[in-house]
Amino acid sequence: MTDRRVSSAVMTHPVRLDQAKDLMARLRLDRLALDPDPEGPPSALRTALVAWSSAGKGAGHHLVVQDDIDAPAELVEIVARAADRFPDEALVFYTNWHARNGAASRLAALAGAAWVRAVPDEFTPSLAVCLPAETAVAFRDFARDSDERHDDELFSVFFRGRGQGRMGLLAVPNIVEHIGTSSINGHATQGIRLAVCPTSAADAAPLLARGRVLEDPGWVPYMRYGEGYIRLAGQELRPDGGRGHLRWREALPDTGLTEELVDTAKDAHLPQPLAAEVARTFGRPFAEELWTHCLLLGRQAAHAARRLGGAPDDVPADALDRLRDSAVTTAGPAGLPPERRPEAGPDEVHAMKELAWSAVRAGGQLP
């Protein structure tokens, strides 16, 4: 049993009301938060304000989920235990597989961490967020008069402005999954959007309760639209607020690595048959970009793992192994351009996964 009660709500729109009611019953959530102006311009924030105003009396924390998710029946219990462990933190239980925060989560998984601090220069994924009750009130007051319609963007603005810009903690094992590709709020052009590290509740529960926290992953490799990029440490301090994208070759001088080192690793370790298998469907440039991205990811994960040290004795090693495999499995599909993701069937995903693992292992040998 937990000693802080968590109240809960599901955000919804009338077109998804039946779906939301089913979710509410299945997860034993407390209440519905219905869009107060369903005929108005699309706005997730409008409904979020209703949801964040609906915390139960006496609840120490409030969980808000969106109606287009799937999650296990144990969701609220797992969230409550996490809130007990991190009573003052904003806790995020879903992270998109293709975003910079998704890349930070993937890196953290490979390093053996169960939580990672969100990057400050990107939206905070808002499909399933738990806030301390007083933080929920503060966010509601902060957001009430905003012209922003995306609650995930405003979350990041809110967190950056509070207490030394402390962002939320991302749960690396994702027990919440996004379902469908439709979007009331205009995100359908992003294509298939899934969790970065989908994990069973049985594995996630001990990891989230006792697993390590990666506060600073350093520079983070990520992919978008089939190409590799690097988010540099401190990038949020740039004039554009860090929202720009630096191709990996452009950012490499600031990482301590060189193109010569990357090219030498590629010549020595790139498995040509696997690269050719991926290239048959998605082209040679994508296969090589994926391999290079995962090489850099493996290097950063190995460095982060050394900083974190060994896993606690009561964290199951096999659960960590499955978490790592989940993270690598999503790297290829997430890195594809949105319009190509439907082409990634089981055989294609398997080939991309094997290619990615070869790169992650090679990256662990880089200085």
Image: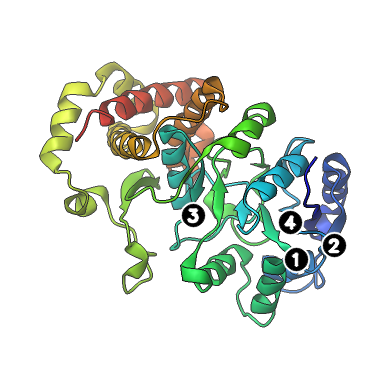
Give whichever of discs 2 and 3 has the lower sequence position.
2
Question: Does 126 sit above or below residue 201?
Answer: below
Question: Does 227 sit above or below residue 321?
Answer: below
Q: Where in the figure is residue 52, as x and y percent of width and height?
A: 75, 66
Query: Which numbered tag is attached to residue 52?
Result: 1
How far is mark 1 from mark 4, CA to CA?
A: 7 Å
Residue placed furthest toward the top: 273
Q: Which structural element holds mark 1? A: helix
Q: Amino acid at mark 1?
A: Trp
Q: Where in the figure is residue 252, as x and y percent of width and height?
A: 20, 49
Q: Which structural element holds mark 3? A: loop
Q: Are marks 4 and 2 in contact (CB under 8 Å)?
A: no
Image quarter of residue 185 = bottom right
Q: Amino acid at mark 4?
A: Val
Q: Where in the figure is residue 267, as x and y percent of width and height?
A: 15, 26
Q: Which residue is mark 3?
A: 118
Query: Which numbered tag is attached to residue 64?
Result: 4
How far is mark 3 from mark 4, CA to CA?
A: 18 Å
How far is mark 1 from mark 3, CA to CA?
A: 21 Å
Mark 2 against mark 1, which lies toward the viewer? Answer: 2
Query: Which numbered tag is attached to residue 58?
Result: 2
